[in-house]
C-alpha cells in the first residue's frame, strides 16, 4: 500500500480510538452536558431581545450556542490537546514514524469531527425541545446545518492545531487560545448582530470563518425574515460555503507544515524537562 495512504488509515484508526476513549471519561461527559445546559437554560428562562434590531433574541442566542459548541470543540480542545501531547512526548513519537505527522493530523481531525458532531447534536436536541423560536427550517435547514457544521469544523481544526503549536506550555496555550477565541467571537456576531459594532469591525468579522458558520446556523434554524438583519440583508449561503472551504483548504495545507516544524524542535531531553515541570506543578 502507498505509504501516504497507510498513514491516513493509521491516523483514521487512531482518531476513532481516541474519540471513544475520551468520550467515555467523566470529565468529557460533563463537558458535553454542560454547554447545552448553560445555553439552552439561559435562552429558555431569560428574555433575550435585541430590541434595536428586532431579531428574536432567544433563537439568535441559541444559534450562537451551537457555534460556540463547535468552535470550542474544534479549536480550543485541539489546541489544548496538542499542547499536552507535546509535553508528554506523543508528538515526538509521531515524528519518529514514517509520515507520522500526517497520520497525527488526520487522527486529530477525525477525532474532533466526531466530537463536534456529538457536542453540537446535544445542544441542538435540547434547543429544539426547550427554546421557542429555534427550529430547523425543514429538511433544507437540516441539510444546511449539516454542511455548515462540517465545513466549519474543517475550517477551525487547522487553526486549533496552529495555535496549539505556538507555545510549549499547555497552560499558556489554553490562555492564548481563549483570548483568540473570545476576540473572534466578539467581532463575528456570534451572539448578537454585527450592527452593534462599527462598520470596519464588521468587515473584519466577515473575513473570518466564525461569522459564516454563524450565518449558516442561523439560516438553518431561524425564520427567513431574520435574514434582513444580517450584514448583507441575506443569508449568503454560497458565499459562506466558499469562505469556509478556502479556510479549510489553506488550513490543512499550513497546519501539517507548522506541526512538522514544531516536531523538528522536539527532542527526548526537551520532553523530559517538560515532564519534570509538569510533575512540579502536580498537574
Image (spheres, rainbow, N blue to C red):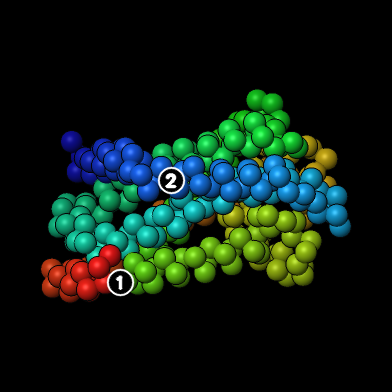
Observer-nearest residue: 227 or 241? 227
Residue at image mark 1: 168
Q: Are circles 2 and 1 on residues that touch, CB within 8 Å? A: no
Q: Secondary structure at mark 1?
A: loop
Observer-nearest residue: 32 or 66? 32
Q: Toward which corner of the image does residue 123 lie, by quadrant?
A: top right
Reply above or below: 217 against 194: above
**Is residue 26 toward the left or the right of residue 33 in the image?**
left
Residue 30 — which label?
A: 2
Classed neighbour count for the residue bearing mark 1: other residues with Cα under 10 Å, few (<14), some (14–19), many (≥20): some
Report how far apart the C-alphas of labels 2 and 1 lie in the structure.
27 Å
Residue under the point 74% across and 36% down: 132
Outermost residue toward the front in this view = 45
**Is residue 105 toward the left or the right of residue 58 in the image?**
left
| Residue 36 horizontal/vertical position (percent) | 56, 43
Observer-nearest residue: 171 or 6? 171
Q: Quadrant of the C terminus?
A: bottom left
Residue under the point 77% across and 49% down: 47
| Residue 236 horizontal/vertical position (percent) | 71, 45
| Residue 113 horizontal/vertical position (percent) | 43, 42
Q: Quadrant of the N terminus?
A: top left
Amino acid at each position: 500500500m502507498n505509504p501516504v495512504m497507510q498513514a491516513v488509515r493509521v491516523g483514521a484508526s487512531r482518531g476513532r480510538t481516541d474519540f471513544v476513549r475520551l468520550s467515555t471519561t467523566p470529565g468529557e461527559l460533563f463537558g458535553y452536558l454542560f454547554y447545552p445546559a448553560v445555553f439552552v437554560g439561559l435562552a429558555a428562562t431569560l428574555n433575550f431581545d435585541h430590541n434595536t434590531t428586532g431579531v428574536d433574541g432567544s433563537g439568535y442566542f441559541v444559534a450562537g450556542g451551537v457555534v460556540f459548541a463547535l468552535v470550542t470543540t474544534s479549536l480550543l480542545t485541539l489546541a489544548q490537546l496538542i499542547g499536552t501531547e507535546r509535553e508528554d512526548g506523543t508528538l515526538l513519537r509521531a515524528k519518529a514514524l514514517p509520515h507520522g505527522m500526517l497520520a497525527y493530523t488526520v487522527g486529530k481531525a477525525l477525532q474532533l469531527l466526531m466530537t463536534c458532531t456529538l457536542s453540537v447534536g446535544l445542544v441542538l436536541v435540547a434547543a429544539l425541545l426547550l427554546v421557542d423560536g429555534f427550529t430547523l427550517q425543514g429538511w433544507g435547514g437540516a441539510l444546511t446545518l449539516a454542511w455548515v457544521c462540517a465545513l466549519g469544523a474543517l475550517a477551525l481544526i487547522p487553526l486549533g492545531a496552529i495555535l496549539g503549536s505556538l507555545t510549549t506550555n499547555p497552560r499558556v496555550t489554553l490562555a492564548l487560545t481563549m483570548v483568540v477565541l473570545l476576540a473572534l467571537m466578539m467581532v463575528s456576531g456570534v451572539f448578537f448582530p454585527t450592527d452593534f459594532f462599527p462598520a470596519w469591525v464588521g468587515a473584519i468579522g466577515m473575513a473570518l470563518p466564525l461569522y459564516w458558520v454563524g450565518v449558516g446556523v442561523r439560516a438553518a434554524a431561524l425564520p427567513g425574515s431574520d435574514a434582513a438583519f444580517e450584514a448583507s440583508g441575506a443569508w449568503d449561503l454560497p458565499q459562506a460555503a466558499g469562505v469556509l472551504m478556502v479556510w479549510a483548504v489553506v488550513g490543512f495545507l499550513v497546519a501539517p507544515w507548522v506541526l512538522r516544524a514544531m516536531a523538528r524542535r522536539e527532542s527526548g531531553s526537551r520532553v523530559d524537562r517538560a515532564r519534570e515541570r509538569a510533575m512540579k506543578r502536580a498537574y
